[in-house]
Amino acid sequence: MPLLWLVAAAVFALGAYRVGWPAWQSYRSRERRDANVDRYLAWRGRADRTASGPTGEGMTGEERRRLWIGGALGIVALVCLAVFFAVT
């Protein structure tokens, strides 16, 4: 029976990874792409001189939702792991 908790922890951890990681990668690649565009425009002398800070759009609603779901699955995985250690 304790092994069931360990399997559940692994399944939930895998689910958290599969849901959250693509959303995080999408957000980071968009941020990196936007920074590259800004550097290129500055190099060409066509940068927007009125921009005073980062102009990133931030996360989309879908990315934010997937990260919340991934975080919740990760917490459930940690709880299952704690129960596994408690019962063994």
Image (tube, grey):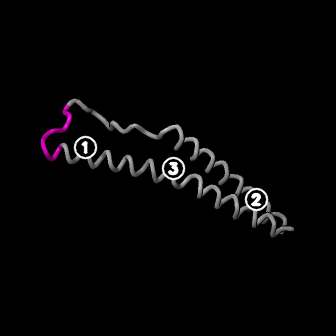
Which residue is most to the left? Answer: 45
As measured in the structure, the alpha-carbon distance from the residue carrying label 3 to the one carrying label 1 is 23 Å
Q: Of label 2 and label 1, which has the lower sequence position?
A: 1
* Residue drawn at (22%, 47%) of the image: 39
Mark 3: which amino acid? Ala
Report the span colored magenta. 42-49
Residue 25 in the image: state x and y as whole percent. 46, 53
Quarter occupied by the N terminus: bottom right
Residue wearing tag 1: 38
Residue wearing tag 3: 23
Mark 2: which amino acid? Cys
Residue wearing tag 2: 80
As measured in the structure, the alpha-carbon distance from the residue carrying label 2 to the one carrying label 1 is 45 Å
Tell me where residue 87 sits by quadrant: bottom right
As measured in the structure, the alpha-carbon distance from the residue carrying label 3 to the one carrying label 2 is 24 Å
Quarter occupied by the C terminus: bottom right
Q: Of label 3 and label 2, which has the lower sequence position?
A: 3
In the figure, is residue 64 to the left or right of 86? left
Is residue 30 placed above or below 2 in the rendered structure? above
Residue 17 in the image: state x and y as whole percent. 59, 58
Label 1 secondary element: helix
Mark 1: which amino acid? Asp
Residue 48 in the image: state x and y as whole percent. 20, 34
In the rendered structure, does residue 47 fall within the stretch colored magenta? yes
Label 2 secondary element: helix
